[in-house]
Image (cartoon, helix red, strand yellow):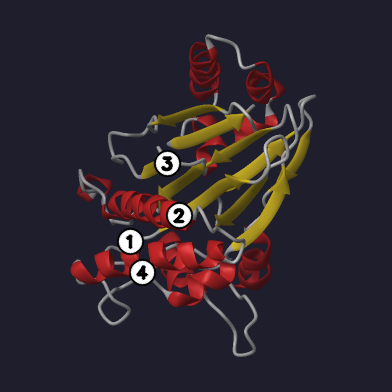
């Protein structure tokens, strides 16, 4: 990528009266390094108890800032194996924050006093001009997608819920929403079986086992390709050709056209398109 175009946007939820900002993103000013994180919503018996400043949002911010700083240090001699190490440094920073808030595995109740956590997606671009590679990770339902110069999607990060669905469908049929959430957090969050098998889902929360849920890979980037990093609020937008087509054309009024689509879709179907969402687009 000789001359990268970079666009970023963070849109609040239509339900922001209850939920403060819990998404965050980071873009290095030194190198082509990008990260997004989505703080996992907290749980309370009464929505009125939701804090104005979210610890989950703070974790998303801490993680992004730590990851960008660590990746910048490693960029000159960066290798694919550094992806896991960079993640570990960010995850440790989250552990330290949770500890500072008195939130440990021994103190939490998996409901209104739980570990602060976040999902994440990351991209670092490095390589020869014209044919660089994108080194990426995703965890939980934040994602990375690569599109070709004709607008076709060449890659999207894996569906994270496949493993989880396999284990919990039979257990969720006759319990309340509160008990379901507590079970998810207690029994399935960053869970690993006795033989090392994955038995749940992964998030950044400071637990060491989160690393086993990290999806990691590399993508070859050709002229005209573009990459999208996104939190789950943008997932349904990626299914719209009018949306992804904007990054193929990259018009001068890209931001305005994007806003028009978001405004229209979120008003028509707020539950599907109105959640808090973050996007970073990178193209030639």
Q: Name the disc covering residue 116, or none.
A: 1
Secondary structure beneath label 1? loop
In this picture, residue 198 sits left or right of residue 62:
right
Q: Decide if residue 41 is in sight here.
A: no
3D distance between C-alphas at marks 1 and 2: 23 Å
Q: Which residue shows up at 67% across the image and 57% down it?
A: 217
> Mark 3 touching mark 2, by CB under 8 A?
yes
Image quadrant of residue 92?
A: bottom left
3D distance between C-alphas at marks 1 and 4: 13 Å
3D distance between C-alphas at marks 3 and 1: 25 Å
Secondary structure beneath label 3? loop
Q: Name the disc covering residue 92, or none.
A: 4
Secondary structure beneath label 4? helix
Residue 102 position within the rendered picture, expressed as x and y whole percent measured from the top left: 20, 72
3D distance between C-alphas at marks 4 and 3: 20 Å
> Mark 3 touching mark 1, by CB under 8 A?
no
Q: Please identify, in this view, whether the residue under mark 2 or under mark 4 is nearer the observer.
A: 2
Q: Decide if residue 122 is in sight here.
A: yes
Which residue bears the numbered disc 3?
28
Q: Name the disc covering residue 71, or none.
A: 2
Q: Which residue shows up at 51% across the image and 34% down it?
A: 279
> Mark 1 touching mark 2, by CB under 8 A?
no
Front position in the image: 26 or 104: 26
Front position in the image: 81 or 149: 81
Q: Please identify, in this view, whether the residue under mark 3 or under mark 1 is nearer the observer.
A: 3
In this picture, residue 240 sits left or right of residue 71:
right
Residue 244 position within the rendered picture, expressed as x and y whole percent measured from the top left: 66, 26
Residue neighbourhood size for the residue with mark 2, other residues' Cα within 10 Å, grouped as few (<14), some (14–19), many (≥20): many
């Amino acid at each position: 990528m000789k001359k990268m175009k970079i666009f970023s946007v963070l849109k609040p939820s239509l339900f922001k009266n209850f939920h403060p900002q819990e998404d965050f993103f980071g873009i290095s000013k030194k190198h082509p390094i990008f990260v997004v994180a989505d703080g996992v919503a907290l749980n309370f018996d009464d929505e009125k108890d939701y804090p104005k400043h979210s610890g989950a949002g703070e974790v998303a911010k801490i993680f992004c800032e730590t990851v960008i700083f660590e990746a910048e240090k490693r960029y000159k001699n960066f290798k694919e194996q550094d992806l896991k190490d960079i993640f570990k440094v960010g995850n440790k920073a989250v552990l330290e924050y949770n500890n500072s808030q008195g939130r440990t595995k021994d103190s939490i109740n998996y409901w209104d006093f739980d570990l602060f956590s976040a999902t994440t997606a990351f991209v670092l671009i490095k390589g020869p001009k014209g044919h660089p590679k994108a080194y990426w990770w995703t965890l939980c339902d934040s994602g990375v997608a690569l599109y070709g110069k004709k607008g076709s999607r060449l890659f999207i990060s894996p569906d994270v819920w496949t493993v989880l669905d396999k284990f919990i469908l039979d257990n969720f049929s006759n319990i309340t929403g509160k008990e379901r959430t507590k079970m998810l957090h207690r029994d399935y969050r960053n869970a690993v079986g006795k033989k090392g098998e994955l038995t749940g889902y992964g998030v950044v929360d400071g637990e060491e086992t989160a690393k086993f849920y990290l999806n990691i890979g590399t993508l070859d980037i050709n002229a005209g390709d573009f990459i999208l990093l996104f939190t789950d609020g943008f997932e349904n937008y990626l299914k719209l050709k009018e949306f992804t087509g904007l990054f193929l054309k990259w018009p001068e009024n890209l931001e305005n056209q994007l806003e028009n689509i978001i405004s229209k879709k979120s008003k028509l179907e707020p539950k599907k398109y109105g959640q808090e969402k973050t996007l970073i687009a990178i193209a030639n």
